[in-house]
Image: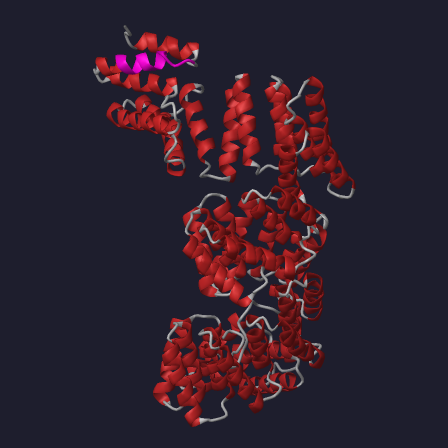
Amino acid sequence: MKNIKPIFSTPNLPIMKITLAFAIFAILLVTAGCQSEDPQEKFQKLMSQAENFRQNDKWEEARISLLSAVQIDQKNAPAYFMLADTYAHLKNFGQAAENYRNALNFDPEHYEARLHLATLLVAAQQNELAESHVTKLLEKNPSDSSALVLKANLEKARGAYDDSKKTLNKVLELEPDNIMAVANLGAIAMLEGRFDEAEQQFQEALRIDPNNSPVQLALADLYTRQQRMTDAQTLLEGLVKEQPENSSLRYYFGDFLLKGGLADQALNEFRTTLAKDPDNHTARDRLIEMYLSRNEIEPARKLIEEVKTIAEDSPIIDYFKGREAEIDGNQEAALSFYLSCIQSLPNFAPAFSRAGVIELARGESNQGVEHLNQAVSTNSDDVTARLALARHGFSQKQFAEAKEHLTNILTRYPRHIASNVMMADIFLIEGETDKAHSVYQALVDAFPSHPVGYFKLGMLEEREGNDEAAIKNYKSALKFDINPFSPARRLATLLRRTLDPDKAEAEMRTLREASKYKGQYDYLIGLIKLSSPNRNEQTLKEAKELFLSAASLEPELSQAYLAIAGLDSMLGNTDDAVKNYNLLVEKQPENTTGRILLALSYEKLGDYNKAAEQYRAALKTNPNLGPAANNLAYLILEKLNGDPDEALQLAEKAKQSMPQDGGVADTVGWAYTKKNSLRVALSYLEEAVTLERSSNEQKTVNPEILYHLAYVQQKLGDSESAKKTAAEALKHPAIPQEIAALIKQTVEVK
């Protein structure tokens, strides 16, 4: 269990910072007046100063003295060991490990240096490196209980629980009251689901040392997994009361409160954690995430600005710069910062998680999944990474994989809302409606003041055809006025279906009056007006006014701009549509839907260069966006007299993401035609025709695709097939005149 460490807690990051000028000044102070001293006397004086500083908990001053000492005697193993231990107290575990290695370089028999280095490596999950040191320790002394505990931890990390238990029992034969062995046996029992046995082991460990915080935390974790939330909370509150200055303990308590859905109290604990330990970057990151989830941007920015001062020369700064870039909507810059952080801190799971999430959003599935798996490998309890992997598995219909990640999260966080919802959604897809209903109802019971349970129950009732029950649940979800858009949209749809438009509109207006999200309701009321069977020019005007109001009240509501521009386009006001799509992409540069619709509007106006610009901008945000890649390839081939090689590259990219789309296969085939690779082109164009026929009940094919096929057939000398294909195209009731003319120029049709 990760909360129980033999000596140190999990390495985080370089913590304490000091400016170079101050460091030089401090070194000068401690060495002033010593110029005439013998080097060995200087060394001994610095070592004594360092020990005195350490005795008085002046760890930074001790570090400076020791750095001066190892400059004088650069092969002194005890000095490097003391420097490493000082770095460990400063929580700079990277430098601690480096100096333990220095100690071993000059004294390979230095027992404590090897033991402490192995402990750090185990805690950092650098298991192969750790194993070599543990092996050397046990070669010297097979009964070394500390080394045996580390060996057991390595076995546990490999999943070899039986081997780990044998090793721990060997430790207990040597030392019956070895608390680490007892506690680790409890951790293994908990991992194997033997909760009663785990509790017995933890209680036995506390008999040995009643005030052992890691064991108490492990017991609290066990209670949480058993959903004994009151027992867990009582235990943790007692610990916090006993150790009010222990920032790590406060962080753990905040995490527990968050598990229980007590977000406000958790926020306060994380704030207290950071106030007591500004270098706790895990707490800082958690606070940033919580602020962003509440749309409180400025407090999140303030936390990032603070860390720039605290850790200005630390690799961790790249991580927080990435968070800042995400807040600014610059995903590309954010990804670059996270990848830079990964290079410097290869065991920092959050950087892998954030990078993976962005890569999945950009359509870079392979790289995203790889980074997320690395995050989980580094920290198996990384909820962000596991949830992202679960969502990816869900989207790919790999439900078993998704459930595996969700189960891991829910084992530790039984009340994790997003994981419960996704698990229930999978139950629903797999036909286990009763299980899904139970989970949704449990969410309502656990979080009666949160809309999600009511919303999901409403969707389930709607799916089952119980409109009245669905409407009731949607209205219950909307009472709290927390992110109301989704339940309000479903409610509007149901009201449009079950009531006349005027009554449906009246109900939505009543809800609007009680909400602070009036723009969202204006948008939905506009949709109700558009759906009216008696729609007329006045109705359309009123709908547009509502959409404009929605955009004005909530500038980030992209659906409002899309609705305005779509309405303009429907009415033939393409110039106005372009204006409104431009407003959207100015406010949301990474809104690829808006950019594609803007590009299509430019195409309608005949401005193909501007259309191409928008497709390229969309592909910059998501390089694997099939529709943008396909449409840009077509423009290059047909309208811009561009490079067929570039068009082919884009079309093939589109084909990878849209393999069943006949239009995309046609674009690939036409690109090969432009390159005069007619045999290859023929296979793609024939595939395009097949895909088109299978996509509609009438088995009709886009006449432009048929023209392309007829053209290639004619070029290859297959005149009969070309005539047959051309004749089919000309029979299409909606064939454009220009396509008909091209067919007649290419093929002699009877």
Q: Which region shows up in magenta?
A: 723-733
Residue 640, percent across and down? 44, 20
Color style of the picture: secondary structure
Residue at image coords 52%, 39%: 621
Residue 99, percent across and down? 49, 76
On the rendered image, what quadrant is the C terminus found in?
A: top left
Residue 523 falls in image quadrant: top right
Residue at image coords 68%, 27%: 529
Closest to the observer: 316 or 615? 615
Closest to the observer: 248 or 212? 212
Compared to residue 511, the image places residue 602 above or below, namely above
Viewed as shown, does residue 655 lie left or right of 676? right
Residue 385, percent across and down? 50, 57
Residue at image coords 51%, 83%: 183
Does the magenta run of residues contain 249?
no
Viewed as shown, does residue 124 lie left or right of 651? right
Residue 471 falls in image quadrant: top right
Viewed as shown, does residue 394 lie left or right of 48? left
Residue at image coords 57%, 32%: 594
Compared to residue 673, the image places residue 6 above or below, namely below
Residue 128, percent across and down? 38, 72
